[in-house]
Image (spheres, grey):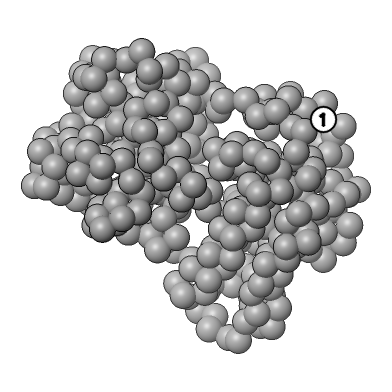
Amino acid sequence: MAKESKMIEVDEEICEKLGRKLKDVQVLPQEFLAESLDGASWTDEQRRREANFRFYLVAICQHTKSLQGTIEGEWRRGWDYLERACRRAMVDNPEYFSAENMSRITGQELRRILSDDFDPAHSTLDRVEERVTQLRDCGQRLSAQYNGDVMSLYRQADGYLHGERGILELMSDFKAYSDPIQKKSFLYLMFVSQAGIWKIKDLENLKVAVDYHIMRIALRSGMVRVGGALERVLKERSEVDAATDIEVRGAVQETCDLLVRYSGHSVFEVDNILWMMGRNCCFYDHEPICGRNVCFKKDRCTFVRSIVYDCPGKCLFDGACLGSQDEEYTKFWETNLYTEYY
């Protein structure tokens, strides 16, 4: 595991340049969230149920690369599969994602709901026991401290992210939400805030949920500059320690703050753009679609469905991103670390 000297810094000039590239882009609601954007017209019971569902869903949203299959006649992968399969489990039992159920869920049951045909043997889910532990911890802590309901956590914090006992501090007590960079916490808060379920009183404290897709973009674009031994480590995809991972993701989170400032977009919109860009243009399965590389996946690109953008067959950041100008930057990868945080 690499513990060599490192240099990590944010390049504000690059952040400003890329932020301005986003300025006139119209961002559409994420497809998987669109169904739950009518929270204002929901009953209190519907809001409670959706808030709890999302809490457990995001709790196990780490390393979803193995998940894939056909749900309701449509092939899905990663987060899309996780979200759709879990929501399907509530059709016959709207209270499936309750503290009582989740506090005693088994690996066999988790595989069952995360399979195309409800056959545990057909599930592609990995790290099952890790996820079971997270779900049980969430269920047990909600039962012990919040009457089994995450809405009680929200009320206890009086709708504030920060404070003497703000939402972020309360969420960090849960094993699944204990990340110092708070990726899952911010992801969850974006969902419930956008859906109108929670009214966050200090929304300015909400940040982009930094995962491996967003890290990859920040490093390849030059928004985060890395030198010393760490440059070699990241390009070779060697393993890093947890402290280095936190440092890199912390710098990436700073760049996202700058993108919000220079683009004029909300944190929700910047998060959506970067996440979709990382899953399509700068995906881990192929070379980045910029510079000399022309798009070959327009027929299945989810990025162009998430923004109003007349795509020329290149990434939105093409020409401003350093990776599109210098192939040496395309050799950067996100940190290589076994983690439950993202």
In the rendered image, the residue lying farthest to the bottom is 5
- At horizontal 79% and vertical 43% (from top left) the residue drawn is 21
Q: Position of residue 200 (x, y in %)?
A: 38, 39
In the drawing, does residue 251 fall left or right of residue 136?
right
**Vertical arrangement, residue 299 with respect to residue 223, above or below:** above
Q: Position of residue 223 (x, y in %)?
A: 71, 61
Q: Residues within 10 Å of mark 1 (few under 14, many from 20)?
A: few
- At horizontal 65% and vertical 54% (from top left) the residue drawn is 258
The number of callouts visible is 1
**Vertical arrangement, residue 29 with respect to residue 201, above or below:** above
Q: Position of residue 72 (x, y in %)?
A: 45, 16
Q: Nearer the viewer, residue 338 or 187?
A: 187
**Vertical arrangement, residue 225 with respect to residue 296, above or below:** below
Quadrant of the rendered structure where residue 335 is? bottom right
Tell me the element at label 1: loop
**Vertical arrangement, residue 247 with respect to residue 84, above or below:** below
Q: Is residue 84 visible?
A: no
Q: Position of residue 98 (x, y in %)?
A: 18, 32
In the drawing, does residue 224 fall left or right of residue 340?
right
Look at mark 1 in the image and give the residue it sits on.
311
Q: Is residue 32 visible?
A: yes
